[in-house]
Amino acid sequence: MSDAATAVIDDADLAAVTSVPQRIIEAWAKHDADAFAAAFTEDGTLILPGDIFLRGREEVRGFMAAAFAGPYQGTRVTGTPLALKPLGESVVLVLTQGGVLAPGEEAVSAERAIRASWLLAKQDGEWLITAYQNTPVKAS
């Protein structure tokens, strides 16, 4: 990470911030909608392609529960940090690239490759997603 990142947040916060995408990867691997939603603030938002705009932890949980039982059944997700941009002592923007892995895949296909913005906020000592949005790398 850059010197600017460590100038605003300490090493413990840096480790916690960079672990948030891993929490999502692990929740997805278990198809655990509760753990997925727990990574969001109570009023967090999730914006996905296809005009999906979810408001609040409960909407995120409900959407992911249905998705894990339906179109995302058997899938995994991956994400690699590209940049970390501290915006203050308790707000950080994390940019990642990755996507959804279909069953048996080891690499994200071009059709499912995304870049994502994760706006994280520190609440009660924990870094949580307050806003997430992803965009396909290759628009068709």
Image (cartoon, grey):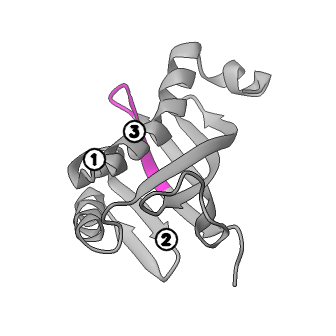
Q: Which mark is residue 30?
A: 1
Q: Is residue 53 left or right of residue 13?
A: left
- Nearer the N terminus, badge 3 or badge 2? 3
SS of the residue under disc 1: loop
Disc ID at residue 23: 3
Instruction: Please provide percent x and percent y for residue 101.
Output: 49, 59
- In the rendered image, residue 36, in percent from the top left (x then y), is placed at 31, 49
Residue shown at 47%/53% (left/top)? 77
Residue 75, visible in the rendered structure: yes
Return the residue at label 2.
Answer: 48
Q: Residue furthest top?
A: 11
Q: Residue furthest right?
A: 3
Which image quarter holds the C terminus?
Answer: bottom right
Mark 3 → mark 2, Cα distance in angstroms: 18 Å
Q: Residue at x 32, y 29 (%)?
A: 124
Quadrant of the rendered structure where residue 65 is?
bottom left
**Which is in the foreground here, disc 1 or disc 2?**
1
Is 63 in the magenta?
no
What number is the disc on residue 100?
none
The answer to whether marks 1 and 2 mark residues whose Cβ atoms lie closer than 8 Å is no
Q: Main secondary structure of the magenta part?
A: strand
